[in-house]
Structures are given as C-alpha cells and as structure tokens.
C-alpha cells in the first residue's frame, strides 16, 4: 500500500529536509517517528527538498508499507513521536503509480519580509528583514521580467543537482501589508519546479531593486547573463516557506494540494 502524507514544519532547528548523517533534518525526524509508530523502518520521498532554516506549510511525502492502519491513525500515531515543530496534517492512501515528486504539476513558495528599522525579535527566524524602505512598484516591474520559461542559471546555486536550469516561473506576486516604515511584504512564487537557492537568489535581486540600488531592468540583464556571479548575494532563508506542491485532482489528495487550490497568502496559519 502506498500512502501520501501532508507535513508542516518550522525549519529553524533543522539542517533542511533531506536526511544527513547528523540526523538533524526534518526527514530524519519524520522517518524516526514513522518507524516508532509502525515498528518497522519506513523510507520516504518528498515533493520538494527545503534548505536549512526554510519552513514547510505543506510538504507532501509518500511511502510504501504493508502496515494496515486508518489514515487518522497514521496522523495521530506518527505525531505522537514527532517533535513539537513538525506535525503530520493528513494521510491519504494513493495508487501505487503516484509519485509525490514526479506527479507534482507545480510548486509554490512564499517569502515573508519585515520592513523595519529594527531587526525582528519575536519573529526571528520566521521572517526576512529589510532595514531600508522598499519600492513595491520597482520590485514588481523587475519580477515581471522573470515570469515565463527561462534559463535561470543566474539564480542557481553551484551545488544544484537539477538536470536543466530551464524552469517555467508562472507567477510572482508581491504584496505590501501595512503602511509607513514598518510593514510586511509577501512574495509568492509558483513554478513547475525550482532550482537550488533559486528563490533566495531572486529575493536578493528583488530587494536590491527595491532599495533603489539597481533599476528594475537590471534583473532582466542578470537573467540573460546566465551567470550566478552577476546576481545579488543569496538572501536569508528565515522568511521562506514551502507552500506545497499541486497535483491533478485524480490522485484524491486534499483540496489544498490540488490544482484547484485557492490557498490565500500567508495569514498566520503556520
């Protein structure tokens, strides 16, 4: 039997998603909890690996098992063995041909940025920070040049293992919440897939434009250069959240994981 699980986690205390020898990753903690509940080793695959410090609103994983439990038992039983900052949200039996990574039609992220003359305190590790005022119109004009299918080599980490740097960035929405020198910015991204550090590298460029250090057209030049060396430094992981993958409804996953999903911008549900 193949099961798909929806996972939510705060990434502050972990070395990313993917299992490492240290055991200090989200995957390590999840597989340890699954093994404790099922009383057998369970290996998992995820829809999208996240870096150290990046949070997951809806990570989707799948695994095969011969253990027969109700979906609710998998949720409650696994959560019993998980740390407080990781929780299974749902469990759904899926066809054997379902693959959480290969069958994802799109992936979504959101970056939360605090604009304030003082660094975050209560929200430390959960939002990025700009001490300087940002120009939303300039950032939107810059972001528009990235939408579509492009070679994103300029925004690709050197350690990226993707077979191709060409991705289809379908949407970038930039929203300001609040007025004055203290406010919140939300940057929403949707693509067929993302390269390693792609969003954080784009964020570094958008913020540079927002500060007025570069004109909006500069991002188009960075994109065309296909060279990581011409872009801005990689931005902090603190405010980056994996909103989750999207699938065809035929797989029977919850609505939030289907292409019909209309999940709103981040409003405190993490």
Image (cartoon, helix red, strand yellow):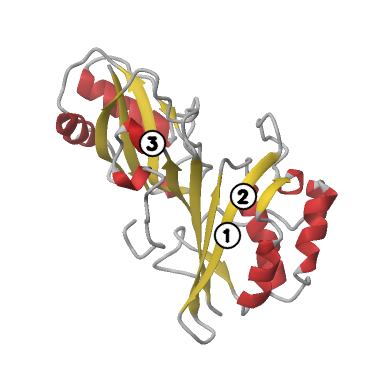
Residue found 63% across the figure and 45% down from its top: 168
Q: Position of residue 270 (x, y in %)?
A: 34, 56
Q: Residue at x 84, y 50 (%)?
A: 225
The residue shown at (36%, 26%) is 62
How far apart marks 3 and 1 lie (CA) works out to 22 Å
Which element carries disc 2, helix, strand or loop?
strand
Q: Residue at label 3?
A: 60
* Residue 221 circle label: none
Query: What residue does disc 1 label?
Result: 172
Residue 207 percent across, percent down from the top left: 66, 67
Q: Residues within 10 Å of mark 3 (few under 14, many from 20)?
A: many
What percent of the width, then of the height, locates residue 188? Answer: 51, 59
Q: Would residue 13 be found to the left or right of residue 37 on screen? A: right
In this view of the protein, which residue sits in the foreground, 28 or 75? 75
Marks 2 and 1 in Cβ contact (< 8 Å): yes
**Label 2 sits on residue:** 169
């Amino acid at each position: 039997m193949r099961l798909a699980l929806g996972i939510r986690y705060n990434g502050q205390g972990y070395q990313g998603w993917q299992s490492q020898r240290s055991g200090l990753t989200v995957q390590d903690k999840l597989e340890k909890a699954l093994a404790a509940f099922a009383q057998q080793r369970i290996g998992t695959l995820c829809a999208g690996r996240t870096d150290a410090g990046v949070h997951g609103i809806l990570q989707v994983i799948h695994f095969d098992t011969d253990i027969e439990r109700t979906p609710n038992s998998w949720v409650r039983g696994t959560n019993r063995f998980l740390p407080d900052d990781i929780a299974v949200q749902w469990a759904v039996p899926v066809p054997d041909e379902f693959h959480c990574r290969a069958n994802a039609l799109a992936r979504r992220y959101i970056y939360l940025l605090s604009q304030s003359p003082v660094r975050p305190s209560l929200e430390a590790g959960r939002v990025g920070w700009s001490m300087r005022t940002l120009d939303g119109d300039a950032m939107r004009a810059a972001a528009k040049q990235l939408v579509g299918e492009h070679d994103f080599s300029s925004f690709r980490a050197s350690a990226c293992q993707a077979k191709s740097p060409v991705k289809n960035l379908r949407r970038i929405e930039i929203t300001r919440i609040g007025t004055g020198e203290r406010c919140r910015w939300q940057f929403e991204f949707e693509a067929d897939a993302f390269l390693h550090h792609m969003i954080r590298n784009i964020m570094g460029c958008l913020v540079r434009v927002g500060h007025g250090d570069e004109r909006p057209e500069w991002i188009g030049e960075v994109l065309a250069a296909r060279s990581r060396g011409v872009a801005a430094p990689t931005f902090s992981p603190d405010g980056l959240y994996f909103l989750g993958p999207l699938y065809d409804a035929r797989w029977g996953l919850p609505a939030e994981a289907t292409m019909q999903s209309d999940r709103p911008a981040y409003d405190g549900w993490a």
